[in-house]
Image (cartoon, rainbow, N blue to C red):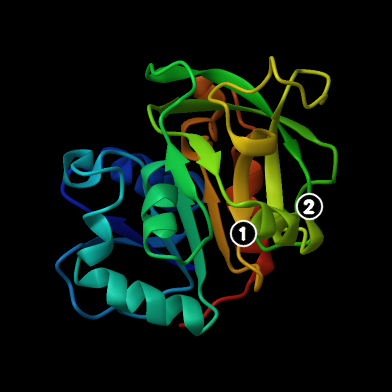
């Protein structure tokens, strides 16, 4: 597969994502600067973590106006796979490619630690290598990860099985204590109705190699590669 890693001013996980897909999984990968107005042929785009435009106004609020985002929207409408991680998730929310918004963490503090996620759906291009109920360990690193959406949209997310990951404890129990940021119903990652866009706050690219002591993030990338879908 061919991956494009979007780079905004302030992105700081772009090289991590590039390294994982290029060197760990041996896939074709390129960086895509935010000022580009055209996209080459890709199967999957990654919007990486970081602080696009310094998170001025709010995370992702300026990034959505980058020239490349017009092409990202077109790519999404054409069925291309898009993975938004942390700040990338926030950009997808601001762009309305995914529903909802991110608020400040409940603690009003930046949180950087490993935690557990429960896999809620295994029928997407991002999760097909797992099974519902799988517990994955992944790191988070964010100040604004408190996911919120109105009641009507929340019901739609539940009914359409768009919630792919929830924060849980090591046993897979979804509890208030396992929720690091106050996110509504412990939501850690969602997809769109068409299931070709995933936004998640945890960082799978930081836990995809044995040298890092954790390979649970491999599930995301291996699922994408195994899906073999996208546009070229």
Q: Name the residue rendered at 21%, 55% in the picture.
A: 62
Residue 126 appearing in the image: no
Asked whether, in this view, residue 23 is left or right of residue 223, the answer is left
Q: Is residue 83 above or below residue 66?
A: above
Q: Name the residue rendered at 20%, 65% in the picture.
A: 66
Asked whether, in this view, residue 111 is left or right of residue 57, the answer is right
Q: Secondary structure at mark 2?
A: loop
**Which residue was labeled with disc 1?**
191
Q: Is residue 157 above or below residue 146?
A: below
**Which residue was labeled with disc 2?**
121
Quarter residue 227 falls in: bottom right
Q: Position of residue 76 (x, y in %)?
A: 47, 76
Q: Position of residue 35 (x, y in %)?
A: 14, 67
Question: The C terminus is located in which quarter?
Answer: bottom left
Q: Name the residue rendered at 55%, 80% in the picture.
A: 79
Q: Nearer the viewer, residue 232 or 57?
A: 57
Q: Name the residue rendered at 78%, 45% in the picture.
A: 120
Asked whether, in this view, residue 219 is left or right of residue 169, the answer is left
Quarter residue 110 falls in: top left
Residue 224 appearing in the image: yes
CA distance for labels 2 and 1:
10 Å
User: Mark 1 Cα within 10 Å, few/some/many (few <14, many 20+)?
Assistant: many
């Amino acid at each position: 597969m061919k991956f494009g890693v979007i780079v905004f001013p302030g992105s700081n996980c772009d090289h991590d994502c590039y390294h994982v897909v290029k060197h760990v999984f041996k896939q074709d990968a390129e960086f895509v600067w935010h000022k580009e107005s055209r996209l080459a042929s890709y199967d999957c785009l990654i919007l990486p973590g970081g602080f696009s435009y310094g998170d001025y106004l709010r995370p992702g609020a300026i990034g959505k106006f980058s020239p490349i985002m017009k092409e990202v929207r077109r790519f999404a409408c054409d069925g291309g796979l898009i993975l938004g991680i942390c700040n990338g998730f926030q950009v997808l929310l601001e762009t309305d490619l995914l529903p909802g918004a991110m608020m400040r963490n409940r603690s009003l503090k930046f949180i950087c630690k490993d935690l557990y996620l429960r896999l809620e759906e295994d029928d997407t291009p991002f999760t097909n290598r797992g099974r519902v109920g799988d517990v994955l360990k992944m790191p988070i690193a964010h100040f604004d990860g408190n996911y919120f959406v109105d009641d009507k949209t929340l019901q739609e997310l539940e009914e359409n099985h768009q919630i792919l990951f929830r924060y849980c404890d090591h046993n897979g129990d979804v509890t208030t204590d396992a929720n690091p940021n106050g996110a509504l119903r412990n939501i850690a990652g969602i997809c769109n109705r068409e299931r070709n866009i995933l936004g998640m706050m945890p960082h799978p690219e930081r836990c995809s190699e044995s040298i890092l002591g954790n390979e649970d993030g491999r599930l995301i990338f291996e699922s994408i590669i195994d899906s073999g879908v996208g546009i070229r």
